[in-house]
Image: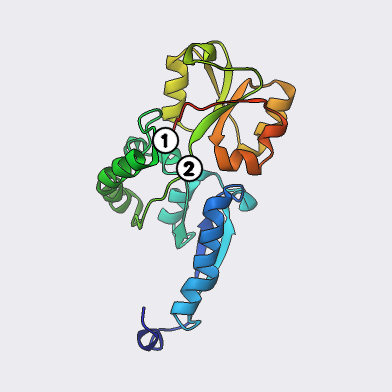
Amino acid sequence: MSTAWAGGIPETQVTVIGTNSAVRHAVIPEKRFWHETLPGLSGGKITANYNNMDLMGIKGFQVLRLLKAGVTDFGSTDVSKLAGDNAVFEGCDLAGLALDIETAFKICDAWKPAMDRVMQKNFNTKLLGTGANPPQVFWCRDPIKQLSDLKGRKIRVFNKTMSDFVNAVGGTTISMAFAEVVPALQRGVVDCAVTGTTSGNSAGWPEVSDFIYPMYLG
């Protein structure tokens, strides 16, 4: 956006639902874009009312519905959490399929057109881009040395493809909000929980889990 072009646009404020505030690697560049880059490129004409979903009491799966309803102009969420509304959103991040970041990018790049078609047709929303999370791994109270050790364990997951994977190896899946995981691990409500290496560290999971099993689930 050139400065000359920006001079001809009206003053506009857009509403933005941002990523969960615990996901620091995503929140920092998001805030920089909406609070600094966009106003800078538009000569201050375009500003954003940006808020993180968890601070507004919004769940990840609700973001696309709010976009469809016109409640927000832009939104960011974990695409796999949208699978309850349409199974196409599982294809970008099937649990255990991509074991490195390069493969993950190839899968999502190949699958983006399919997701975008569904978003435009069913949700009046345009998919602008995708990004990567750190590896989603198992954080556990007790040692896990191999997949068979997950059998019989109560494991917190956060999407359907993870649930399918854990059930297939004999684990019992439990769905709960990110903020509830630390007390659940502390009290033994769950034996393990899945999240990213960065978000888990930021949220204090090492204080309530002594072991990580680095089987990448997404």
Residue 199 image point, x, y percent? 59, 42
Disc 2 residue type (three-letter) = Phe
Q: Quadrant of residue 82?
A: top left
Query: Which residue is the site of mark 2?
Result: 61
How far apart, in angstroms, are the residues tagged by discs 1 and 2?
Answer: 8 Å
Residue 30 image point, x, y percent? 51, 60
Q: Is residue 46 visible?
A: no
Residue density around tag 1, few if under 14, some if 14–19, many if 20 or more, within 10 Å: few
Q: Is residue 206 above or below residue 117?
A: above
Label of residue 195 in the image: none
Q: Is residue 183 left or right of residue 105?
A: right
Residue displayed at 64% across by 22% down: 190
Q: Is residue 123 left or right of residue 151?
A: left
Q: Is residue 117 above or below residue 38?
A: above
First reached walking from the N terminus: tag 1 or tag 2: 2
Q: Is residue 96 left or right of residue 214?
A: left
Numbered disc 1: secondary structure: loop
Residue displayed at 31% across by 38% down: 88
Residue density around tag 2, few if under 14, some if 14–19, many if 20 or more, within 10 Å: some
Q: Is residue 175 above or below residue 29?
A: above
Q: Image quadrant for the C terminus?
A: top left
Q: Image quadrant for the N terminus?
A: bottom left
Query: 114 or 94, which is in the foreground?
Result: 94
Residue 27 image point, x, y percent? 55, 55
Query: Which residue is the site of mark 1?
Result: 84
Q: Is residue 3 visible?
A: yes
Q: Is residue 168 left or right of residue 144?
A: left
Asked if disc 1 and disc 2 are in contact, CB closer than 8 Å, the reply is yes
Residue 49 image point, x, y percent? 56, 67
Q: Quadrant of residue 84?
A: top left
Residue displayed at 45% across by 39% down: 81
Disc 1 residue type (three-letter) = Gly
